[in-house]
Every structure is written in C-alpha cells, then in structure tokens.
Image (tube, helix red, strand yellow):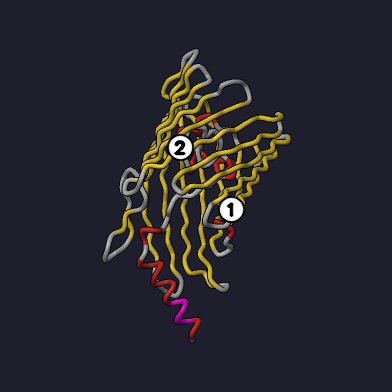
Amino acid sequence: MKKLILLTSLIALLALNLNALFETYPSSARARGMGDAFFTLSNDSDASFYNPAGLDEADNQFNLGMVDLYGNKYLRVYTASASYRFSPIYGTIGIAGKQLGVDFEDTSLSTESTFTLSHAFKLMKDLHSSIAFGYSLNMYDLEFAENYGSDSAFGLNLGAIATMHQRTKLSFAIHNINNPTMGDDEQFELPRKMVTGIAYQPYYGVMTTLELTKELKGDTSVAAGIEYTLYEAMKLRAGVHNNPAVYSAGVGFNVRGMLVDYGFTYHSDLDPTHHFQVGYRF
C-alpha cells in the first residue's frame, strides 16, 4: 500500500511539472564529448537531433546510443538515427528517435518519446562556398503509468549552415518554431530555442566550434568544443558548456565503416555521465 501511495505521488508530481519534460540534453556521444557544441558541425545522421541542415553532408549511416543521465539508471535514454543521401539535387533524408524513461523499482513512471523525420538540401554552391537548408518534423509522445494518461504534440525545426572556403562554417537553428503544447486543462509549452554558431578549421584535422543557445524562457548559454583527428580512424574531443556548467571529453573510432563513440560529461554537483554509441557508415 505504501508503495502504491509513493508511486501515485511521484507520478502526480511528474504530471504537474510538465515544464520539465522534453528538456534538451546531448543526444549524441560525439556531441557530448564536445560540450554539445554540435549544431554547426552536424554532419552525420545525428544531425536530426541538432541542425537538420547538417544532413546535407551526412553519409549513408545509422547510429544507436544509450546513456544513463548523470549516472542514474532510472533516467536512461535510448537514441537511434539514420541518414540516406538521394542525390545532390534531392538532398538527404534522416529519421531519428529517442526515448527517456523514468523508472522506480521496476515500474515505469513516465516515458518521453520523440520521433523525427528530417530533410536537407543545398540552396547554393560555388567553388568556395555553399549554403545548406534543412527542416525536421518532430512527434512528441508522453505517457504516464497508473492510467494517468498520455499526450502528444508536433514540432517543427529549421536550420541552415553556410560553409566558406571549406574552413569556416556559420550555422543557425531554431527548435519548435510552431510553439507546440501539451495538456488539456492547462497548456504547457514544449522547450523552444535558437542556436547560432561558428566553426573554424585552423589546420587539417582540427575543428573548433563556438555556439550560443537562447532558450525562449531561459538564459543564454555558451558551448565550445574541439575535435582533433589523431589518426584517420581515431578522433579526440573536448568541450565546455556554461549552463549548466559542465566539462566534457570523448573519443571516436571509425574502422572500415564501423563507428564507436564515447562521450563523458563532468558536472560539479551531479554524478558524471557516460554516453556510448555505435553505428555503421556505408
């Protein structure tokens, strides 16, 4: 009986605090290793989670990931993404999904699922520069245990990436531009944000990035990251993020198309996060 009362109380708190749902967190081990400064460098299938315009540079590939947020097994996130290039004219399509489950003593309190369909293509390209545009349609699904109900909503993301002289990139992305909401008696807005950034390649094998993120009803955060190609099959990553204040590092391997990525986040107050991801590029 006590367990039932506790479960009911926890679910009620989750249901009342819808503003905390579908919060953004690194959805890619590669991005986590760079402090989540990944909107400008999005060039793989995980671009659907960040800047859909980055799919224009993605290969045919898929990624699968798993992470326990801040080391908590009751906050486990699963991610999956895939990209397929049709042609330079028709661009690249991407599909992605992620699920966050909140569990307590083998009971699922709530499940947040996001399913994304993305498309990217080039608006312009010449000898020294190019501009890519992308868009994503997201379906958000929320389910509570103990018959507390469920709800869903749709969101639209837009993004663009401009490349100049193959060494500098400028990016812009906006998430949930259509202001999706959840709730019947009281409407709760899902997180909306705008991101702008710049990436620069000082010399071959090194990419640096700096990004600003503005939450519609929150503060502006700054993220910076670096990716260093130690060998053709191995990349080292590091990054920082100020809101929340975290330090990140990671490593990635690419052996004959097999992808293995690991990202680590250190938080001053919470336990560290270990993010693992595998994939294949073909």
Question: What residue occupies the far top of the structure in this picture?
Answer: 127
In the image, the segment drawn in magenta is 4-8
Q: Nearer the viewer, residue 215 or 59?
A: 215
Contact, CB < 8 Å: mark 2 with mark 1?
A: no
- Identify which amino acid the numbered label 2 is placed on: Asn
Which amino acid type is shown beneath numbered disc 1?
A: Thr
Q: Tell me how many marks there are.
A: 2
State the image quarter where residue 281 is shown: top right
Residue 51 x, y percent position in the rendering: 45, 37
Work out which quarter of the rendered image holds the C terminus and state it. top right
Which label number is shown at residue 197? none
User: Along the line of sight, which residue is nearer the eye, 153 or 8?
Assistant: 8
Q: Who is closer to the viewer here, 270 or 13?
A: 270
Q: Which residue is mark 1?
A: 273
Indicate the position of residue 130 as horizontal and vertical percent values: 46, 20
User: Residue at left 28%, top 59%?
Assistant: 187
Nearest the viewer among 260 and 123 is: 260
